[in-house]
Amino acid sequence: MTLNTTLQAARDMGVPERYAVMRRLAFLQPQIKHLEREIWGARRRTDRSRDLLIKALSESLIRDQEKELRPMKREATALLNHVNGKETVQAPGGITQEMIDQARQYPITSIIEFSKGRYRCCPFHEDRNPSMALYENHVHCFVCNRTWDSISATMALDGVTFREAVLALQS
């Protein structure tokens, strides 16, 4: 959920905006704290353990939970800024965090075609053997040792700026 969806829901339900924002914050804060505690515990397990499997599983858990935590923290910050009157006004033609998030969710398989499974030859260098792997919504080339999401892939393939890529990926 975003600040705008929270405000729109408040308007739709006839609830004061401030009340809706405060309720959303009350919902988010315990979830954020829980994830932060889980990440902290996993880091401790990683630091203390000598077992490679436990380290690998803990690191995977940390990555997954940080991926879940980042948008929650961004939303909480936007909600707090709104309540405190610290909203940033976008310049005409500017891009918002919501637009960036939406562009990152654009399916990377629509940008880079994967015809057979999750591996293909990398389009960013001469490649005879498939070296690029498809993960959730990003790709990684083991030869380039680089990872691309929808925005960075559009920037690299089309030779456009970050702003142009975000605007191009609005769906």
Image (cartoon, rainbow, N blue to C red):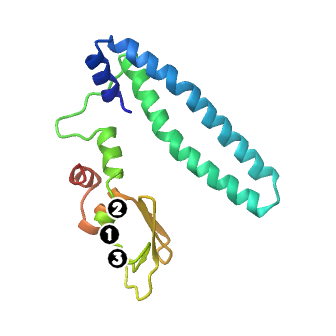
What residue is at 32 percent from the left and 39 percent from the top? 98
Q: Which residue is mark 2?
A: 108
Disc 2 and disc 3 in contact, CB within 8 angstroms: no
Q: Which mark is residue 87?
A: none
Q: Amino acid at mark 3?
A: Ser
Spot occupied by residue 101 in the image (x, y as percentages of width and height): 35, 44
Q: Earlier in the sequence, mark 2 or mark 3?
A: 2
- Other-residue count near label 1 (Cα within 10 Å), few / some / many at <14 / 14–19 / ≥20: some
- Other-residue count near label 2 (Cα within 10 Å), few / some / many at <14 / 14–19 / ≥20: many
Mark 1 → mark 3, Cα distance in angstroms:
10 Å
Residue projecting furthest to the left = 92
Spot occupied by residue 123 in the image (x, y as percentages of width and height): 34, 76
Q: Is disc 3 placed on a helix, strand or loop?
A: loop
What residue is at 37 percent from the left and 13 percent from the top? 18
**Near-viewer residue (64 or 122):** 64
Mark 2 → mark 3, Cα distance in angstroms:
13 Å
